[in-house]
Image (cartoon, coloured by chain):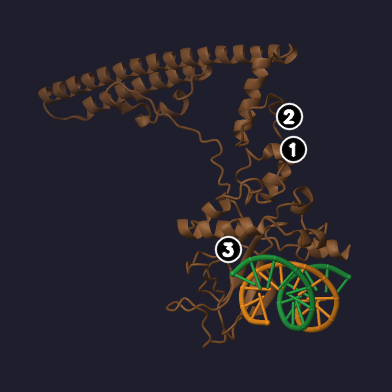
Chain colours: A brown, B green, C orange
Amino acid sequence: MEAARKADYGGKVKEEKRVESDAGEGDCKEERVPKVGNGRRDHENDNIKPSCTKPNQKELTSCDKQMTVMDGMERSSEELNSKASSSTQKEKDEQLESAKAEMGEVKEENQRLRMYLNQIMKDYQNLQMQFHDIVQQETKKSTSPPNNHQEAEETELVSLTLGRTSTDPKKVENYVIPSKGQVHEQDKEGLALGLDCQVHEQDKEGLALGLDCQYEMPKITLAESSLNASPENSLEEVKEEARDTLPPPKILKTMRSGEDGVSEQSPAKKTRVSVRVRCDTPTMNDGCQWRKYGQKIAKGNPCPRAYYRCTVALNCPVRKQAGKWDENTNAAKNDQMNWNPLIKTGNGERKSPRCPSA
DNA sequence: TCTATTTGACCGGC
DNA sequence: GCCGGTCAAATAGA
């Protein structure tokens, strides 16, 4: 029991809240403002705007009323203008003419608006019909047994939403749309942990996003590539990992059964990712949780070298070394006592101290 | 009491 | 045999 608990790298892992800003795009309602006639917007006339944008029969009649009122207002204003004008008859005639012309324009615009409303009404009715047909088809489908083609099509759509596809039809059938909080047990490992290497055999293809799934192929893994490792460095480290993934028989004997799930599933290979990075800050606040599991005093360096393992996730194979490192000599510094968590690399290369799991 | 750190011992590679 | 890496019991601290 105790051994099993310790095997979990000390039990609980501090949770780091990551607020994924789900700034929902929500219902992005697109407001379309129809242009009418000579390019003027129909709601430039504030008398028409509120009710005429929606193609409703009642509103259509109210719209007509408003237009009639508007015409009356135009006329009254025209009369007022004619009465108020104390200038000559000629000026009155001119004003009358201009007013008449203006009235004509307004009437034309009124007509165009009516035509536009009629068009909108027609479209609206067409859409309503189509929607009705679709609803009827859906109800028919739900009552009748679906054929295989449709089912496959749907499941493929679902698998696309999950970000994984499968060519195995049986497997495809297993994927259903998970409701909230209802995730397939198979997917929990990969989705929740995201870096756990206990990947089912059948999931290996799809879950290439796993942290370090080099069971069969100890080549360059995604973990390495995600570190932006330089080619030479990655090669060297991959060699290291390849060595480390093959624990000797003695270790296999003494390896605790509960140490990690990897040893249970594939006892011949124990994955591990070593991150050798440089960090200029006194703390390795890199978004990961590192737990110190050992410390050594390297030869010729009074500053101890600390060994950390990633505790972001259970069985996370990522390790980290920390110690002082001299920029110039690419060797351990020994003239400063308060060392920084500086991670050496095999060839002196430094990386950002970010756990690929994070 | 639980969790993280310390530290001596152990192991494998060179 | 030396050295680096890891383990795990002991210890510290919250």
Residue occupying the point 30% across, 27% down: A40
Q: Which chain carries label 2?
A: A
Three-letter code for the amino acid on which mark 3 is drawn: Val
Three-letter code for the amino acid on which mark 2 is drawn: Asn
Q: How crowded is mark 3: few (under 14 residues within 10 Å), some or many (20 or more)?
A: many
Q: Position of residue A151 (x, y in %)?
A: 67, 19
Q: Are marks 1 and 3 on the same chain?
A: yes
The answer to whether A78 is drawn above or below residue A271 in the figure is: above
Q: Earlier in the sequence, mark 2 or mark 1?
A: 2
Q: Do labels 3 and 2 share a chain?
A: yes
Residue occupying the point 61% across, 27% down: A157
Q: Position of residue A5 (x, y in %)?
A: 83, 63
Q: Which of marks 3 and 2 is nearer the N terminus?
A: 2
Nearer the observer, A62 or A146: A146
Q: Mark 1 lies on which chain?
A: A
A229 with respect to A78 (left or right): right
User: Gap between marks 1 and 3, in whole Å?
Assistant: 32 Å
Q: Residues within 10 Å of mark 2 (few under 14, many from 20)?
A: few
- Circle 3 is placed at which residue position? A275
User: Gap between marks 2 and 1, in whole Å?
Assistant: 9 Å
- Circle 1 is placed at which residue position? A184
Between tags 3 and 2, which lies in front? 3
Q: Can residue A28 be seen in this view?
A: yes
Q: How crowded is mark 1: few (under 14 residues within 10 Å), some or many (20 or more)?
A: some
Three-letter code for the amino acid on which mark 1 is drawn: His
- Circle 2 is placed at which residue position? A174
Quadrant containing the C terminus of chain A is: bottom right
Residue occupying the point 55% across, 71% down: A343
Q: Residue A320 carries which label?
A: none
Residue occupying the point 16% across, 30% down: A86
Task: Tell me whether circle 2 and circle 1 mark residues in contact (CB < 8 Å).
Answer: yes
Mark 3 residue element = strand
